[in-house]
Every structure is written in structure tokens, then in C-alpha cells.
Image (tube, helix red, strand yellow):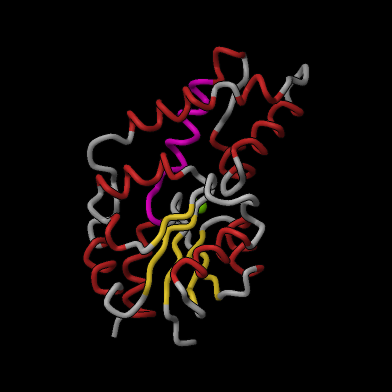
Amino acid sequence: MPDFDSVLFDFDGVLLDTEPMHCACWAEVLAPLGVRLEWGFYSACCIGIDDRDMLRMMATQSDPPRDWQELWAQYPAKKELFRTRMEGTPPFEPALPEVLAALELRHKLAVVSSSSCAEIEPLLVNGGIRAHFGTVIGGDTVKRLKPHPEPYLLAAERLGVKAPLVLEDSEAGLASGRAAGFQVRAIKHPREVPALLRELLLP
Ligand SMILES: [Mg+2]
């Protein structure tokens, strides 16, 4: 196991189990347009990619095909719906804050997500864990999203680190971390993250 100097966390599906909520919110704002979004399709094809790419795919597959921009026009409504549903205390893993506090003594930490900072930051603040992260890279922070390496390269540059461990749950995210030249670890659910970090990085 290499000597990691930092941990770069994807957000959705790694720090917080937000994907079912993202899917439900998109489904709700697209339904009035006659467009259906179901969890089976979302979980198989849409996790880890940019929302615009998801909508382009849905627009093409619609019968008859739709203008994806018509679907994208619902983005502000989706974002607001997600924000209100996640208000209060977001359901982070109970063991997470303590593990981040211990990790931060020897490692720099960052969040690297395709979601916008406006969506992520309030959840980190409400969860009481924002201060552990040296930087938060959102989809709106970079020009090229995952699977491009730019988000992870920018996080490492901002933290001034050379040997990050990347934690990711999606193919696009894993590809992005690998393309940046970093060690990546696939995560199936946020509940496994505290124990994994203890095992790998906390003596
Ligand atoms: Mg993810």
C-alpha cells in the first residue's frame, strides 16, 4: 500500500447516499413534460455523468425524441427540490466525522464531485464536516468533467499533494481518478467508507 498524503472523496455515493434522491427529484420535475425517469435506468446509466449528458441521452431515447434543452430547463427546479429535501441534517454515516477528524491530522482531504458546489457545500456544512476539507471541487469549478482527469488534477494542485487516494463509486469517477494518475478505490456504498479509511490509513 503506497504512502498516501491525501484522500480525494467523490461526494454522491461515497460521502452521502444521494443518488436515490437525485433520481427522485429529476423524475418529479420531468414528469409534467411527459418524460419518465426510473431508478433502474438512472442507476445503470446516469450515475457519475454530467446531468446534461443524462438529459441528452433521455431526450434521444424518448418517443418521439425531445429537445434536451427543454429538459435541461427543469434544472433550477430540480436543484431547489433537492435542496429542500436534503435540508436539516443530511444522513452522513455516523462514524464519518470522527474518521475525517483523525485522518486530517496526517492527510489533506478534498471533495471532488460533478455536482455543483451550491448543491454540495450546504450539505457538508449542515453535516458538520465542511472544515475537514481543504477544497471542494464541483462540476461548476472545472471545464471538463469526469471521466476527464481535470477535477482530480485540480484538487491535487489546490491541496499541493502528490499521492492521493481517490474514493469513487462510479465508472466515470474511477476513470477520472485513474486518468489523473492516482490510486483509486471503488466504493459500493457510503456505509463502507469509515471502516475502509480506518483500515487503510489510520494506524
Ligand atoms: Mg459518485
> Which residue shows up at 24% across the image and 61% down it?
97
Relative placement, left or right, of 175 versus 202 is: right
Residue 109 pos. (x, y %): 38, 67
Magenta highlight on residue 19: yes
> Which residue shows up at 42% across the image and 55% down it?
136
Tell me where the magenta segment starts and ends, as one range: 15-29
89 vs 94, nearest the viewer: 89
Tell me where residue 96 sits by quadrant.
bottom left
- In the displayed structure, would residue 194 be above or below residue 30? below
Tell me where residue 100 sits by quadrant.
bottom left
> Which residue shows up at 44% across the image and 69% down it?
159
Residue 9 pos. (x, y %): 44, 62
- In the displayed structure, would residue 22 be above or below residue 47? above
Magenta region, mostly helix, strand or loop? helix
170 vs 181, nearest the viewer: 181
Relative placement, left or right, of 187 versus 64 is: left
Q: Quadrant of the C terminus?
A: bottom left
Magenta highlight on residue 179: no
51 vs 118, nearest the viewer: 118
Relative placement, left or right, of 123 versus 5 is: left
Residue 174 pos. (x, y %): 59, 63
Relative placement, left or right, of 84 versus 172 is: left
> Which residue shows up at 50% across the image and 64% down it?
155
The number of numbered badges drawn on the structure is 0
Residue 69 pos. (x, y %): 67, 24
